[in-house]
Image (cartoon, rainbow, N blue to C red):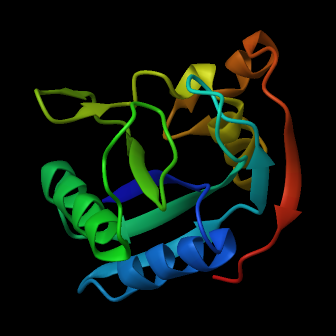
Amino acid sequence: MNYIISLGTNMGDKKKNLEKAIDSLNNIPYTDVIKASSIYETEPVGYLRQDNFYNIIIEVKSQFEPHEMLGICLGIESGIGRIRGIKNGPRIIDLDIIFAEDKKIKTKNLIVPHPRYNERNFILTPLLEIYSNGEYCGINFKKYINDVKNQKIKTADKILV
């Protein structure tokens, strides 16, 4: 199964945090990061009194099912040092499953597609970079880009996958 995962960080060495998360995913058996966008610097959404974020979108191929992948993502966050505090507040790393192919899942712990992906420039812009046709598994995400206002974004760096 293929997943689209959004990674974000705004504490410490931001690029290194993203690299650690990608390395951690690649170290999981039967799991490989197969595509990655550039790193984008974005202003925070929600809680504004914090540093800008580095965000990236990756595609991951894995034999794990969506709830198992959620557990993997949460484990990686914990392993890198994520402590949950202020909602939408500063974080050393955040991994969110945006898509699990074309599956629709709504449980207490997991909603896929991610319920706010279409409101976030830090998801849509890097997603468009790696899927220039504006679609992933039949999901047209490009149609939302012009609706997202007041979310500045700029390319910050590259990660080699």
Residue placed farthest to the top in the image?
147
- The number of callouts visible is 0
In the picture provided, is 129 more to the left or to the right than 127?
A: right
106 left or right, relative to 9: left
Which of these two is toward me, 38 or 15? 15
Residue at the image position 73 percent from the left and 46 percent from the top: 52
Specify whether 18 is left or right of 100. right
Please name the residue shown 75% across and 10% down the image: 147
The quadrant in which residue 74 appears is bottom left
Identify which residue, 115 or 15, lies in the foreground. Answer: 15
Q: Identify the residue at image location x=76%, y=22%.
A: 145
In percent of the image, x 31 and y 47: which residue is there? Answer: 84
From the viewer's perspective, is residue 75 above or below residue 52? below
Question: In the image, is residue 81 above or below residue 53?
Answer: below
Q: Quadrant of residue 50?
A: top right
From the top left corner, tell me how far across and down residue 100 is, in percent. 34, 45
Q: Position of residue 55 (x, y in %)?
A: 65, 53
Residue 44 at x, y = what percent? 66, 35
Q: Position of residue 136 (x, y in %)?
A: 56, 41
Pick the quarter of the image with the N terminus. Answer: bottom left
Please state which of residues 75 and 25 is positioned toward the viewer in this rendering.
Answer: 75
Seen as rendered, the residue at the extreme front is 49
Indicate the quadrant containing the C terminus: top left, top right, bottom left or bottom right.
bottom right
